[in-house]
Image: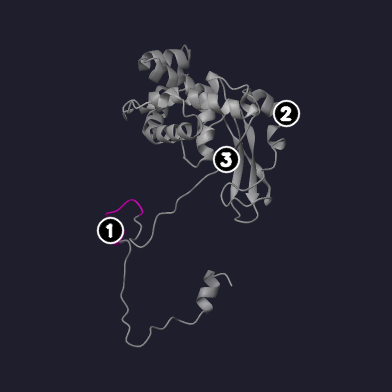
Amino acid sequence: MPLTSGSLQRERPFSLPAGAKQISFDPYPEKRRGRCRQKAWPAHRQAPLKIIVVIVVAFGPEIQKYIKNEGHKLCPRPGQCGHCQTVGRMVGHGSYWRKPKDLTRAWWMRVKRWRCQACRRTTSSLPGFLLPWRHYLVWVIQAVLVRRLEAGGSWAEVVAGCSDRQPGVAPLPAPRTMQRWLKAFSGRAPAWLLAVLGELARQESGSRWLEPRGPTTAGAAQSLLLVSLDLLAWAKNRWSELAGYGVSDRLAFLSHWGNSRRLGRLV
């Protein structure tokens, strides 16, 4: 019987064995005294790890077509759960709203959601032109990263070339938003770069990136953008569905490739 507040009240009180001593333990002593603002987990417990799994669905780069054709109703049913890997137990679980943006406007669109009958966790079918946890379209984010990391442009040049500047109106996206993208990408680039190089070592041993050059942490973000082209070239030779992907799609492909391997967030 599942434990609820009512069932706990009806249970008999717990009695200690003979000779045992009861020890009082306060897991949050600092919080009781008002000295800790963040939740502190006891030593014998670990903070819960929230893993979000998304399934990428290729609807093309145009969000207008997705909205017009109600793309969330056209998503194919996943064959297995991304959490517990159970096959054939995914059922529809409605949809939720997203409000993606580009340089000029924002749209309202729905994202299909699925639920596993085995583990009861949910999975979303995310269109390929979106990244998890980001409101702007992927090509906007990629343009900022490429202009800053590969072209070596200053922030003034990045803002001028990657935002919509109208007289009397703040540019979209805001400069601080662009800086957050770069900070997030640069912070996760070293781990992602090792994962990509490991994949190329297993699948494409002749890649130029496998030569002993020892990429440093400082150049990991720029190296990750460049090596993503090699990863995309290898994937296009293996999966015909990626035939239409080009240089402008490498960030979307890289993010979704890493998501399928549980690498977590990229930007």
Q: Is residue 202 above or below residue 120?
A: above
Which numbered disc, 3 or 1, marks the residue closer to the eye?
A: 3
Q: Which amino acid does label 3 sit on?
A: Val
Q: Where is residue 168 in the image (x, y as percent from the top left)?
A: 45, 14
Q: Element at badge 3? A: strand
- Density class for disc 3 (Cα within 10 Å; few <14, some 14-19, many ≥20) is many
Along the polypeptide, which appears first: circle 3 or circle 2? 3
Seen from the viewer's position, the closer of residues 155 and 256 is 256
Q: Residue 30 carries which label?
A: 1
Q: How many marks?
A: 3
In this picture, residue 238 sits left or right of residue 153? right
Q: Which residue is drawn at 60% across and 48% down?
A: 122
- Density class for disc 1 (Cα within 10 Å; few <14, some 14-19, many ≥20) is few
Q: What residue type is labelled 1?
A: Glu
Residue 167 lies in the magenta-colored region: no
Residue range in magenta is 29-39
In this picture, residue 96 sits left or right of residue 136? right
Which numbered disc, 3 or 2, marks the residue closer to the eye?
A: 3
Q: Do the residues labelled 2 and 1 touch (CB within 8 Å)?
A: no
Pointer 2: what residue?
69
Q: Where is residue 180 in the image (x, y as percent from the top left)?
A: 40, 29
Seen from the viewer's position, the closer of residues 106 and 126 is 126
Pointer 3: what residue?
54
Work out which quarter of the rendered image holds the N terminus and state it.
bottom right
Q: Which residue is drawn at 36% across and 17% down?
A: 155
Q: Quick check: can you spot residue 66?
A: yes
Q: Element at badge 2? A: loop
Q: Residue at x 42, y 17 (%)?
A: 147
Seen from the viewer's position, the closer of residues 255 and 230 is 230
